[in-house]
Image: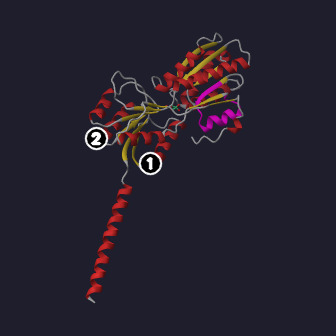
Amino acid sequence: MKKTGLILSICALFFALFLQGCGKVKEEKNEPRLLLGVSQIGSESAWRIGNTKDIEEEALNYGVGLMLENANQKQENQIAAIRRFIAYKVDVIAFSPIVEEGWDNVLKEAKDAGIPVILVDRDINTSKEDLTTCLIGADFYNEGVMAAEYLKRKADSLQMDHVNIVEITGTENSTPMRQRQAGFFDTIKDDKRMTILESIDGDFLTSRGAECMRYLLDTYGSEIDAVYSHNDEMTIGALPEIEEAGFAPGKDMIIISIDAGQEAIDVLKEGKINCVVECTPKLGKALMETALKLKNGEEVDKVIHPEELCFSDEMDTSTIAPRGY
Ligand code: GZL
């Protein structure tokens, strides 16, 4: 009898140790691989919303603990969020700077706290070295080049001897605004047919795109041959104003946009937009892989550009796959 009791006690002990071990394995399994603080600009466009969604999904896929704060288009909110991440001692900080200037102090604080900072989507303008580790985002300059190259081909096909262009830009002093404008201007500057009538800041917003287009139509009317808009939201805002003024967008005026969200692609298929340059919001995978490398002390590339396409009325638009944003 005694022997049986001893065997049962030993089995009970092993079973208890086994359960405790499972508990520990389970506990370790739930432990995030790293804590990532992300300051996101806002929710101003389908692109931004798609970018946030992709970051959240990829954080789950990679087992990354994510603290994501929406700054509602205010730089001061981004700075405050970064300070909270520092106080919280996150492993890595990532942010998409709404504008290029004004980050030196808070990034110096992150550097002094030993927390690496990844730039996502947009860049900063600083004279200080090593405030950030890398940039993951589009080649905005090339997006401007692709937009201008399309316009030159379109002018050729329509045998236009002059092309009067109005430009609706994104948020002033933001990286996409500066580089999309530079890439476009550098590409058209030697083409004698091309004239920029005016550039105006639409702040990447639908409502501002409409206001800008209304002003440009009142000012230049039928002189306008082409509209170069830095994002789909402003383009979508501009189209009804063009129709209201009695013009057919995509026919009376060449319409060029950037982002390539589903809504703009659908309008491209209707023939009211002529060209949409892709700017993918799907940066989450690259962000998680880069943050994990930094946590593990590995080297990372200074700049990571995703591949980007140009959709236009030169192709069979029915073949364009669903965009997912
Ligand atoms: C581009 C991103 C821009 C998008 C806009 O990477 O910064 O900001 O083109 C968004 O839609 O508002």
Give whichever of discs 2 and 1 has the lower sequence position: 1
SS at mark 1? helix
Q: Nearer the viewer, residue 33 or 52?
A: 33
**What's the coloring here?**
secondary structure
Q: Residue furthest bottom?
A: 1
Taking the spot 35% from the left edge, 59% from the top edge, the residue there is: 27
Closer-to-camera residue (15/254): 15
Residue 48 at x, y percent in the picture: 50, 37
Residue denoted by label 1: 62
Q: Which residues are magenta?
A: 255-273
Q: Can residue 258 be found in the magenta stretch?
A: yes
| 32 left or right, relative to 220 | left
Q: Dot 1: within a 10 Å radius of its alpha carbon, few (fewer than 14), some, or many (20 or more) residues?
A: some
Q: Which mark is residue 287?
A: none
Name above or below for residue 48 compared with residue 34: above
Question: Where is 194 relative to 58, above or below?
Answer: above
Q: Is residue 76 magenta?
A: no
Residue depicted at x 66% and y 34%: 267
- For residue 87, the mark is 2
List x then y, in percent, for residue 231.
Answer: 56, 29
